Amino acid sequence: MDSARRQAYLDAMGIQTWVSRDRLSEGQAVAGAPVVVDAGSVTPEPVVATPEPPPAPARAGGFPSEMLRAALRGEADVAPLPESPKRPPPPVESRQAVDVRPALDLDGLDWPQLAEVVAGCRNCELHSTRTQAVFGVGDQRARLMIVGEAPGADEDRQGEPFVGPAGQLLNAMLVAIGLQREQVYITNIIKCRPPSNRDPHVEEAAACRGFLDRQIALLQPELILCLGAVSAHHLLATDLPVGKLRGRPHQLPMGANVAVTYHPAYLLRKPEEKVKVWHDLQRVARLLQGERG
Ligand code: SF4
Protein backbone atom coordinates (compact mmCIF):
# COMPACT_ATOMS: atom_id res chain seq x y z
CA MET A 1 0.00 0.00 0.00
CA ASP A 2 1.51 3.39 -0.90
CA SER A 3 2.09 5.89 1.85
CA ALA A 4 -0.50 8.43 0.68
CA ARG A 5 -3.27 5.84 0.63
CA ARG A 6 -2.22 4.43 3.99
CA GLN A 7 -2.24 7.92 5.52
CA ALA A 8 -5.71 8.52 4.11
CA TYR A 9 -6.92 5.34 5.77
CA LEU A 10 -5.32 6.27 9.07
CA ASP A 11 -6.82 9.76 8.84
CA ALA A 12 -10.21 8.18 8.33
CA MET A 13 -9.70 6.12 11.46
CA GLY A 14 -8.49 9.13 13.46
CA ILE A 15 -5.03 7.60 13.92
CA GLN A 16 -2.62 10.41 13.25
CA THR A 17 0.67 8.67 12.58
CA TRP A 18 1.56 5.25 11.32
CA VAL A 19 5.06 3.88 11.84
CA SER A 20 6.01 1.02 9.58
CA ARG A 21 6.93 -2.33 10.98
CA ASP A 22 10.20 -2.21 9.05
CA ARG A 23 11.24 1.04 10.66
CA LEU A 24 10.49 -0.36 14.05
CA SER A 25 12.42 -3.50 13.37
CA GLU A 26 15.36 -1.36 12.34
CA GLY A 27 15.16 0.34 15.72
CA GLN A 28 14.47 3.78 14.38
CA ALA A 29 13.38 6.32 16.94
CA VAL A 30 9.70 6.99 17.37
CA ALA A 31 10.06 9.34 20.30
CA GLY A 32 7.90 12.38 19.88
CA ALA A 33 5.79 10.90 17.14
CA PRO A 34 2.16 11.94 17.71
CA VAL A 35 0.81 8.41 17.67
CA VAL A 36 -2.65 8.13 19.21
CA VAL A 37 -1.81 5.14 21.28
CA ASP A 38 -1.20 4.79 24.94
CA ALA A 39 0.23 2.00 26.97
CA GLY A 40 -3.19 0.76 28.01
CA SER A 41 -4.53 0.68 24.52
CA VAL A 42 -1.82 -1.63 23.23
CA THR A 43 -1.65 -4.07 26.06
CA PRO A 44 -1.45 -7.47 24.39
CA GLU A 45 -4.63 -9.45 24.46
CA PRO A 46 -4.84 -13.19 24.91
CA VAL A 47 -5.07 -15.00 21.61
CA VAL A 48 -5.45 -18.62 20.73
CA ALA A 49 -2.07 -19.45 19.36
CA THR A 50 0.85 -17.49 20.71
CA PRO A 51 0.53 -15.20 23.71
CA GLU A 52 1.58 -11.62 23.20
CA PRO A 53 4.95 -10.83 24.82
CA PRO A 54 4.76 -8.69 27.95
CA PRO A 55 5.12 -4.99 27.32
CA ALA A 56 8.50 -3.43 27.97
CA PRO A 57 8.75 -0.50 30.34
CA ALA A 58 8.28 2.89 28.78
CA ARG A 59 11.45 4.82 28.04
CA ALA A 60 11.65 8.19 29.71
CA GLY A 61 10.64 10.83 27.23
CA GLY A 62 10.01 8.36 24.44
CA PHE A 63 7.34 6.01 23.20
CA PRO A 64 7.52 2.46 24.57
CA SER A 65 8.94 0.84 21.48
CA GLU A 66 8.26 -2.75 22.53
CA MET A 67 4.62 -1.91 23.11
CA LEU A 68 4.44 -0.23 19.77
CA ARG A 69 5.97 -3.27 18.09
CA ALA A 70 3.37 -5.42 19.78
CA ALA A 71 0.63 -3.10 18.63
CA LEU A 72 1.85 -2.95 15.07
CA ARG A 73 2.85 -6.55 14.69
CA GLY A 74 -0.51 -7.32 13.13
CA GLU A 75 -2.29 -10.57 13.64
CA ALA A 76 0.32 -13.01 12.42
CA ASP A 77 0.30 -14.83 15.71
CA VAL A 78 -3.42 -15.49 15.97
CA ALA A 79 -4.86 -18.89 15.23
CA PRO A 80 -5.70 -19.48 11.57
CA LEU A 81 -9.23 -19.77 10.30
CA PRO A 82 -10.44 -23.27 9.62
CA GLU A 83 -9.28 -24.42 6.21
CA SER A 84 -12.67 -25.71 5.23
CA PRO A 85 -16.16 -24.52 6.09
CA LYS A 86 -17.00 -28.20 6.65
CA ARG A 87 -14.57 -28.35 9.54
CA PRO A 88 -16.38 -28.45 12.88
CA PRO A 89 -16.61 -25.02 14.47
CA PRO A 90 -14.45 -24.23 17.48
CA PRO A 91 -16.13 -24.89 20.79
CA VAL A 92 -18.32 -22.13 22.06
CA GLU A 93 -17.21 -21.10 25.50
CA SER A 94 -20.24 -20.29 27.40
CA ARG A 95 -23.79 -19.28 27.51
CA GLN A 96 -26.43 -21.75 26.62
CA ALA A 97 -27.74 -21.01 23.17
CA VAL A 98 -31.44 -20.36 23.18
CA ASP A 99 -33.86 -21.57 20.58
CA VAL A 100 -33.36 -18.90 17.99
CA ARG A 101 -36.01 -19.65 15.43
CA PRO A 102 -39.10 -17.51 15.41
CA ALA A 103 -42.38 -19.26 14.83
CA LEU A 104 -42.34 -18.22 11.18
CA ASP A 105 -40.97 -20.43 8.44
CA LEU A 106 -38.49 -18.16 6.74
CA ASP A 107 -36.51 -20.66 4.71
CA GLY A 108 -38.07 -19.98 1.35
CA LEU A 109 -38.21 -16.20 1.61
CA ASP A 110 -36.19 -13.97 -0.71
CA TRP A 111 -34.91 -10.53 0.26
CA PRO A 112 -38.10 -8.54 -0.46
CA GLN A 113 -40.30 -11.15 1.18
CA LEU A 114 -38.10 -11.26 4.26
CA ALA A 115 -38.05 -7.48 4.53
CA GLU A 116 -41.83 -7.43 4.31
CA VAL A 117 -42.17 -9.99 7.10
CA VAL A 118 -39.77 -8.03 9.32
CA ALA A 119 -41.63 -4.78 8.67
CA GLY A 120 -44.82 -6.31 10.01
CA CYS A 121 -43.29 -8.52 12.69
CA ARG A 122 -44.84 -8.65 16.15
CA ASN A 123 -42.76 -11.56 17.43
CA CYS A 124 -41.69 -9.67 20.53
CA GLU A 125 -42.79 -6.69 22.57
CA LEU A 126 -40.39 -4.33 20.83
CA HIS A 127 -42.88 -4.00 18.01
CA SER A 128 -45.07 -1.89 20.28
CA THR A 129 -42.48 0.84 20.87
CA ARG A 130 -40.70 1.01 17.51
CA THR A 131 -41.26 3.65 14.88
CA GLN A 132 -40.34 1.08 12.26
CA ALA A 133 -38.32 -2.10 12.00
CA VAL A 134 -34.77 -1.63 10.72
CA PHE A 135 -34.12 -4.51 8.37
CA GLY A 136 -30.64 -3.86 6.97
CA VAL A 137 -28.91 -2.03 4.17
CA GLY A 138 -26.19 -2.60 1.63
CA ASP A 139 -25.06 -4.91 -1.12
CA GLN A 140 -27.07 -8.12 -1.00
CA ARG A 141 -24.13 -9.88 -2.66
CA ALA A 142 -21.55 -8.45 -0.27
CA ARG A 143 -18.60 -10.53 0.90
CA LEU A 144 -18.55 -8.78 4.28
CA MET A 145 -21.56 -8.61 6.59
CA ILE A 146 -21.58 -6.17 9.50
CA VAL A 147 -23.76 -7.12 12.46
CA GLY A 148 -24.37 -4.54 15.15
CA GLU A 149 -26.56 -4.65 18.20
CA ALA A 150 -29.88 -2.90 17.84
CA PRO A 151 -31.32 0.22 16.25
CA GLY A 152 -30.94 3.43 18.22
CA ALA A 153 -33.08 6.55 18.04
CA ASP A 154 -31.64 7.75 14.72
CA GLU A 155 -31.97 4.31 13.17
CA ASP A 156 -35.51 3.89 14.46
CA ARG A 157 -36.43 7.22 12.92
CA GLN A 158 -34.66 6.73 9.58
CA GLY A 159 -35.16 3.00 9.14
CA GLU A 160 -31.49 2.36 8.42
CA PRO A 161 -28.82 0.80 10.64
CA PHE A 162 -25.71 2.68 11.71
CA VAL A 163 -26.64 6.26 10.99
CA GLY A 164 -25.56 9.14 13.22
CA PRO A 165 -22.09 9.50 14.77
CA ALA A 166 -21.51 5.77 15.26
CA GLY A 167 -22.52 5.15 11.67
CA GLN A 168 -20.13 7.81 10.44
CA LEU A 169 -17.32 6.17 12.36
CA LEU A 170 -18.29 2.80 10.92
CA ASN A 171 -18.06 4.33 7.45
CA ALA A 172 -14.55 5.56 8.31
CA MET A 173 -13.61 2.11 9.60
CA LEU A 174 -14.71 0.59 6.31
CA VAL A 175 -12.80 3.20 4.32
CA ALA A 176 -9.75 2.23 6.37
CA ILE A 177 -9.78 -1.15 4.65
CA GLY A 178 -10.74 0.17 1.25
CA LEU A 179 -14.48 -0.49 1.41
CA GLN A 180 -17.40 1.85 0.95
CA ARG A 181 -20.53 1.42 3.03
CA GLU A 182 -22.43 0.40 -0.11
CA GLN A 183 -20.08 -2.53 -0.68
CA VAL A 184 -20.97 -4.36 2.54
CA TYR A 185 -24.23 -5.49 4.09
CA ILE A 186 -25.13 -3.93 7.45
CA THR A 187 -27.74 -5.12 9.91
CA ASN A 188 -28.29 -5.69 13.63
CA ILE A 189 -28.97 -8.59 15.95
CA ILE A 190 -32.48 -7.31 16.47
CA LYS A 191 -34.49 -5.18 14.09
CA CYS A 192 -36.49 -2.97 16.45
CA ARG A 193 -35.22 -0.35 18.87
CA PRO A 194 -35.32 -1.29 22.56
CA PRO A 195 -36.78 1.50 24.71
CA SER A 196 -34.18 3.96 26.02
CA ASN A 197 -31.55 2.13 23.97
CA ARG A 198 -31.22 -0.61 26.57
CA ASP A 199 -29.54 -3.84 25.58
CA PRO A 200 -31.92 -6.30 23.96
CA HIS A 201 -33.19 -9.08 26.17
CA VAL A 202 -32.25 -12.66 25.41
CA GLU A 203 -35.85 -13.48 24.53
CA GLU A 204 -36.04 -10.55 22.12
CA ALA A 205 -32.81 -11.54 20.41
CA ALA A 206 -34.05 -15.11 20.20
CA ALA A 207 -37.35 -14.01 18.70
CA CYS A 208 -35.51 -12.00 16.07
CA ARG A 209 -32.66 -14.41 15.35
CA GLY A 210 -34.42 -16.23 12.54
CA PHE A 211 -34.43 -13.03 10.50
CA LEU A 212 -30.69 -12.62 10.89
CA ASP A 213 -30.11 -16.28 10.07
CA ARG A 214 -32.17 -15.92 6.90
CA GLN A 215 -30.22 -12.78 5.96
CA ILE A 216 -26.97 -14.73 6.43
CA ALA A 217 -28.33 -17.62 4.37
CA LEU A 218 -29.35 -15.28 1.55
CA LEU A 219 -26.12 -13.29 1.62
CA GLN A 220 -23.68 -16.15 2.27
CA PRO A 221 -20.95 -13.72 3.30
CA GLU A 222 -17.33 -14.72 3.35
CA LEU A 223 -17.02 -13.05 6.73
CA ILE A 224 -19.32 -11.61 9.38
CA LEU A 225 -17.91 -8.82 11.53
CA CYS A 226 -19.63 -8.50 14.89
CA LEU A 227 -19.51 -5.00 16.33
CA GLY A 228 -19.69 -4.93 20.09
CA ALA A 229 -20.43 -7.30 22.92
CA VAL A 230 -24.17 -7.57 22.40
CA SER A 231 -23.70 -8.60 18.80
CA ALA A 232 -20.97 -11.11 19.58
CA HIS A 233 -22.72 -12.57 22.59
CA HIS A 234 -25.97 -13.25 20.80
CA LEU A 235 -24.49 -14.36 17.50
CA LEU A 236 -21.84 -16.62 19.01
CA ALA A 237 -23.77 -17.63 22.15
CA THR A 238 -20.96 -16.65 24.47
CA ASP A 239 -20.45 -14.39 27.46
CA LEU A 240 -16.79 -13.69 26.86
CA PRO A 241 -15.81 -10.04 26.62
CA VAL A 242 -14.93 -8.54 23.26
CA GLY A 243 -11.31 -8.30 24.38
CA LYS A 244 -11.15 -12.11 24.48
CA LEU A 245 -13.16 -12.66 21.30
CA ARG A 246 -11.33 -10.30 18.93
CA GLY A 247 -8.32 -11.59 17.01
CA ARG A 248 -9.63 -15.16 17.05
CA PRO A 249 -11.44 -17.25 14.47
CA HIS A 250 -15.08 -18.05 15.10
CA GLN A 251 -17.55 -19.95 12.99
CA LEU A 252 -21.31 -20.31 13.06
CA PRO A 253 -22.86 -23.77 12.83
CA MET A 254 -24.07 -22.85 9.34
CA GLY A 255 -20.41 -22.39 8.33
CA ALA A 256 -20.06 -18.60 8.27
CA ASN A 257 -16.75 -17.27 9.55
CA VAL A 258 -17.02 -14.55 12.18
CA ALA A 259 -14.68 -11.88 13.48
CA VAL A 260 -15.32 -9.61 16.46
CA THR A 261 -14.30 -6.07 17.27
CA TYR A 262 -15.51 -3.13 19.30
CA HIS A 263 -18.65 -1.18 18.47
CA PRO A 264 -18.13 2.29 16.93
CA ALA A 265 -20.23 3.83 19.72
CA TYR A 266 -17.73 2.39 22.21
CA LEU A 267 -14.88 3.92 20.24
CA LEU A 268 -16.57 7.30 20.43
CA ARG A 269 -16.40 6.99 24.21
CA LYS A 270 -12.92 5.41 24.27
CA PRO A 271 -10.98 6.63 21.22
CA GLU A 272 -7.78 5.16 22.63
CA GLU A 273 -9.16 1.75 21.66
CA LYS A 274 -9.06 2.64 17.97
CA VAL A 275 -5.64 1.08 17.57
CA LYS A 276 -7.10 -2.32 18.50
CA VAL A 277 -9.89 -1.88 16.00
CA TRP A 278 -7.34 -0.88 13.40
CA HIS A 279 -5.61 -4.22 13.94
CA ASP A 280 -8.95 -6.03 13.76
CA LEU A 281 -9.76 -4.29 10.49
CA GLN A 282 -6.39 -5.23 9.04
CA ARG A 283 -7.19 -8.81 9.92
CA VAL A 284 -10.61 -8.51 8.26
CA ALA A 285 -8.91 -7.18 5.13
CA ARG A 286 -6.48 -10.09 5.13
CA LEU A 287 -9.29 -12.61 5.55
CA LEU A 288 -11.18 -11.05 2.66
CA GLN A 289 -8.02 -11.34 0.59
CA GLY A 290 -8.04 -15.06 1.25
CA GLU A 291 -5.33 -15.12 3.84
CA ARG A 292 -5.68 -17.27 6.88
CA GLY A 293 -6.04 -15.63 10.01
FE1 SF4 B 1 -40.02 -8.82 15.39
FE2 SF4 B 1 -37.39 -8.62 15.80
FE3 SF4 B 1 -38.90 -6.45 15.94
FE4 SF4 B 1 -39.08 -8.29 17.87
S1 SF4 B 1 -37.26 -7.04 17.38
S2 SF4 B 1 -40.81 -7.29 16.82
S3 SF4 B 1 -38.77 -10.19 16.69
S4 SF4 B 1 -38.54 -7.71 14.11
Image: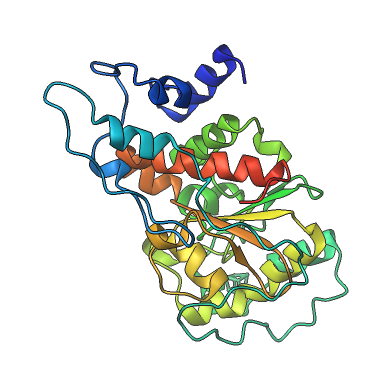
Q: Quadrant of residue 109?
A: bottom right
Residue 109, compared with residue 248, is above or below; it is: below
284 vs 280, left or right, is right
Q: Quadrant of residue 187?
A: bottom right
Residue occupying image coordinates x 38% and y 57%: 243
Quick one: which residue is furthest to the front in this view?
26
Q: In x, y percent, where is residue 19?
A: 41, 21
Residue occupying image coordinates x 22% and y 40%: 56
Quick one: which residue is furthest to the top in this view?
4
Q: Observer-nearest residue: 241 or 217? A: 241
Screen quadrant of the N terminus: top right
Q: In x, y percent, where is residue 186?
A: 64, 50
Tell me if residue 270 can be seen: no
Q: In x, y percent, where is residue 253?
A: 69, 75
Tell me if residue 107 can be seen: yes
Residue occupying image coordinates x 82% and y 49%: 141
Q: Observer-nearest residue: 237 or 148? A: 237
Task: State the count of labels.
Answer: 0
| Quadrant where ligand 1 appears | bottom right
98 vs 18, left or right, is right
Residue 212, compared with residue 27, is above or below; it is: below
Residue 28, compared with residue 278, is above or below; it is: above
Residue occupying image coordinates x 52% and y 59%: 248
Q: In x, y percent, where is residue 271?
A: 33, 37
Q: Observer-nearest residue: 209 or 24? A: 24
Q: How is the image coloured?
A: rainbow
